[in-house]
Amino acid sequence: MNDPFGEAILDYFENGKASKIIVNSNYTEDEEIPPSWFFRTEKEMPKIELEALKLCRDKVLDVGAAAGCHSLILQKKGFNVTALVISPIAAEVMKKRGIYKTVVADIFKYSEEKFDTILLLMNGTGIAGTIQ
């Protein structure tokens, strides 16, 4: 499987540096994200992300978890978190970082469990499409 996203996450995890990740989505083209962004601590996160984390309840699905920075915070606070990512390499990095439950799947095909909170942050918010 061609997994440049996962490879960048792994490079940063192992070496502290990696090429920037370029994201194309339904609302942006060629947005550059440094891999370090996926390894932020709670103190490094913008207020809007911290507010979203405060709204999480009970069993949480972190969609597009990348390197698991949000999952780790929630897990440390006692939440039952499942970190979902489409990249098998990123999932392995999350396991090495201590995330208990990772799932490699396409969110549109994943229906194994029910959750109290579905967390979509950063570029993941585009998955939801419109409010309707």
Image (cartoon, rainbow, N blue to C red):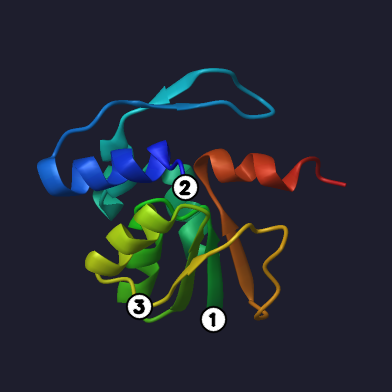
Instruction: Pick whichever, 12 or 122, lies toward us.
Output: 12
Q: CA distance from mark 2 to mark 3?
A: 24 Å
Residue ID for mark 2:
1
- Given the image, on which type of amino acid does mark 2 rest? Met
Q: Which x, y percent locates residue 20?
A: 32, 26
Disc number lying in front (2 or 3): 2
Q: Is residue 39 left or right of residue 58?
A: left
Residue 10 screen position, x and y as percent: 26, 47
Q: Nearer the viewer, mark 2 or mark 1?
A: 2
Pointer 3: what residue?
Answer: 100
* Residue at (64% x, 77% y) in the render: 115
Disc on res. 58: 1
Say what secondary structure mark 1 lies in.
loop
Residue contact at pointers 2 and 3, CB within 8 angstroms: no
Q: Quadrant of residue 29?
A: top right
Q: Is residue 83 left or right of residue 93?
A: right
- In the rendered image, residue 33, in percent from the top left (x then y), is placed at 38, 28
The mark nearer the N terminus, 2 or 1, is 2
Q: How far is the residue under mark 1 from the one under mark 3?
A: 15 Å
